[in-house]
Amino acid sequence: MAGNTSARVIDRAGGWGFAYVLAYVGAAIYFVSVSDGSFWGVVLGLLQAIVWPVYVVYHVLVLLKA
């Protein structure tokens, strides 16, 4: 055998997880604050916070008249 040929793998993508959590928390605060305050309104606000990028893409496409 030629020796120890193990390779090091450095994963530098960990920082984006914090940005995603921060974006979710911000979207959750927004959508819950504009809900009517009922239980299902808050649940719907939390679900909307998960898919908020879809709203952004939709409104950008509407502005572009695409």
Image (tube, rainbow, N blue to C red):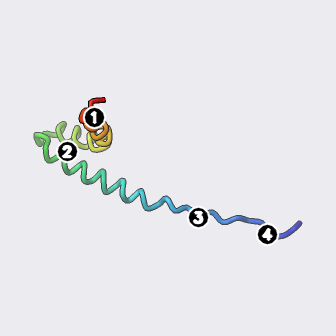
Query: From the viewer's perspective, is residue 24 above or below residue 18?
Result: above
Q: Which mark is residue 64?
A: 1
How far is disc 3 from disc 1 in space, using C-alphas?
41 Å
Between discs 3 and 1, the one toward the N terminus: 3
Q: Earlier in the sequence, mark 3 or mark 4?
A: 4
Q: Give the x, y percent position of residue 34.
A: 13, 44
Q: Which mark is residue 10?
A: 3
Mark toward the viewer: 3 or 1: 1
Q: CA distance from mark 4 to mark 2?
A: 54 Å
Q: Are marks 2 and 3 in contact (CB under 8 Å)?
A: no
Number of numbered tags placed on the structure image:
4
Amino acid, disc 1: Leu
Report the residue marked by disc 4.
4
Q: Regarding mark 3 in the picture, which secondary structure is present there?
A: loop
Q: Could you tell me which secondary element the residue under label 1 belongs to?
A: loop
Is tag 2's residue or tag 3's residue first in the polypeptide sequence?
3
Marks 2/3: CA distance?
Answer: 37 Å
Disc 4 marks a residue whose amino acid type is Asn
Residue at figure coordinates x 87%, y 68% from the top left: 2
Q: Position of residue 26 (x, y in %)?
A: 24, 53
Kind of residue indicated by mark 3 = Ile
Q: Nearer the viewer, mark 2 or mark 1?
A: 1
